[in-house]
Amino acid sequence: MLTVTENAKEELKRTLLAHTDDPEKALRLKLKKPGQFGLVLGREAEGDCVIEQEGFKVLLVGSDIAELVKDVTIDVRDTPDGPKLSVLRE
């Protein structure tokens, strides 16, 4: 099962609010290429796994990639450029 840490949820919320004020939109986890994920703005679709933070839908995971991320943890790591989301395989 996908795990999203509290720090990651906060970072997702900050990122979401920096890019939209539409309450119907959230960040969607997408597979860019094998082993590489990205985030895009999107709306909730039937079958999505929805991760919330303080009443905000911050991350949507479609059924198309749910199996790929079942053993994944999304966390935040500090970098010289500031906090960055990272995807870790368990």
Image (cartoon, grey):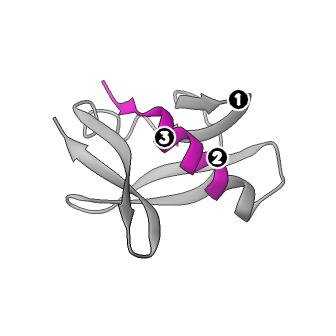
Q: Which residue is mark 3?
A: 7
The residues colored magenta run 1-15
Magenta run includes residue 50: no
- Per the picture, the main secondary structure of the magenta-coloured stretch is helix
Most extreme residue toward the bottom, as rendered?
A: 81
Q: Which residue is mark 2?
A: 13
Above or below residue 60? Residue 33 is below
Q: Say which amino acid is labelled 3.
A: Asn
Q: Which residue is mark 1?
A: 54
Taking the image as shown, residue 70 lies to the left or right of residue 24, namely left
Identify the residue shown where x is 77% and y is 59%. 20
Q: Residues within 10 Å of mark 3 (few under 14, many from 20)?
A: some
Q: Residues within 10 Å of mark 2 (few under 14, many from 20)?
A: many
Q: What kind of element bears circle 1?
A: loop
Label 2 to label 3: alpha-carbon separation: 10 Å
**Quarter placement of the N terminus:** top left
Label 2 to label 1: alpha-carbon separation: 9 Å
Taking the image as shown, residue 43 lies to the left or right of residue 73, namely right
**Image quadrant of residue 72?**
top left
